[in-house]
Image: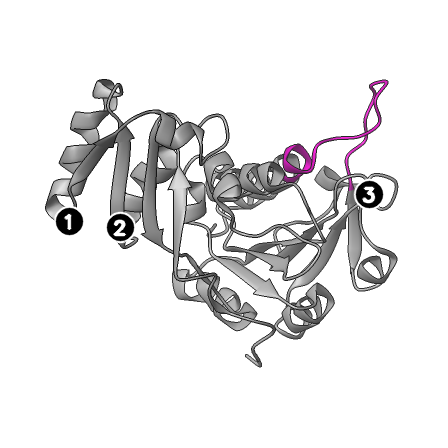
Amino acid sequence: MKTKKTGPAGKSGSDEWIYGLNPVLEAIRSGRKIKSVLVAASRKDIASELESELAPRGVRLQRTDASFFDGRFPKGHQGLAALVEAREYKSVEELIGIPGDKGQVPLFLILDCLEDPRNFGAILRVADAAGVHGVVIQSHRSVALSPEAVKASAGAAEYVPVAMVSNIKHAMREMKENGLVIVGAEAEMGSPAWELDLRVPLAIVIGSEGRGLRKTVKEGCDLFASLPMRGAVNSLNASVATGIITFEVMRQRTTSGKTY
C-alpha cells in the first residue's frame, strides 16, 4: 500500500487534566501514564475502587476539598480529576495500517470542522461502540482531544485512535489512494445509508454543526449517504447521525459475514 504521513502527529501536549469517573478509570485501565489522581474527600463511594485500580501502578489517591474541583473544572466533574500524560495523535498513515493489522475491513470517520467538544466526545463514544478504526480531525477551526471532549466520551477517548491533520482534504486523498471509498454524510444529497453498499473499505465524512460539509470537502467525496427524516425538525445531531450510519455499516458487514 502506498502511504505517506499527513499533517501533525504526536503528543497533543505534555501533561493534561481529565475529570469525571469514567474518563479517569478508563485512562488508568488503558495504561496511560498517571501522574496524580485527586478525589473530593466527600466521595467515599468511589475511593475504594480508585485505590484498587491505582495500587498496581504505584499511584496514591489524594483526597482534597470539593472546592478544588469547582474552581477548575466544568459541572459534571464528579469530584474526581487526574493529571495524566497527554494522548498522542496518530498520523493518517498509522490509522490506515490499523484495520490491516486486525484483518478487518477499514472504517474511519473524518470530521469536517466539528467545533463542539461534547459532540466530539459523543462521536468518540459511538466510534468505540461501532468498531471504528480511527477518527481524523483538523488542527484549526476544529475540536481537539480536550478535557471536555474526553469527559463527554465517557472513557471511549482512551481507545479510539485520533489523527490531527492540517487539511482533511489531503487526508481524504491519502485514504482514497489506499483504496478507501469516501462517503459524505449529507442530509439532502445521495441515497439513504441503508441503500448503499457499506461493506467496502470506508471513510465517512461528518460535517460541522449547522454548516454541514464544506463545498470543497463535498468535491472530494465519492458518494453521499443521507438519512431521510419525517419529523418537523429536519436535522440530527452530528453524533446521532454518526451512530445511525456506523451501525448500518456494522449491520451490513455482520449480515454479509465479512470480518468486522
Q: Marks 3 and 2, how far apart in space?
A: 46 Å
Total number of numbered labels? 3
Q: Is residue 112 left or right of residue 143?
A: right
Amino acid type at circle 2 is Ile
Between discs 3 and 1, the one toward the N terminus? 1
Q: Marks 2 and 1, how far apart in space?
A: 8 Å
Q: Which residue is mark 3?
A: 191
Q: Which residue is mark 2?
A: 34
Say how the picture is coloured.
Answer: one colour
Amino acid type at circle 1 is Arg
Disc 2 vs disc 1: Cβ atoms closer than 8 Å? yes
Tell whether position 3 is magenta: no
Q: Which residues are magenta?
A: 226-242
Label drawn at residue 57: 1
As drawn, 152 above or below 42: below
Q: Residue at x 52, y 56 (%)?
A: 134
- Label 3 sits on a secondary structure element that is strand
Between discs 3 and 2, the one toward the N terminus? 2
Dominant secondary structure of the residues highlighted in magenta in the image: loop
Image coords of residue 4 (percent x, y): 57, 80
Q: Is residue 170 left or right of residue 160?
A: right
- Label 2 sits on a secondary structure element that is strand
Disc 3 vs disc 1: Cβ atoms closer than 8 Å? no
**Quarter where residue 141 is shown:** bottom right
**Quarter where residue 61 is shown:** top left
Q: Quadrant of the N terminus?
A: bottom right
Local crowd size for mark 2, using a 10 Å CA cut-off: few (<14), some (14–19), many (≥20): some
Image coords of residue 52 (percent x, y): 14, 34
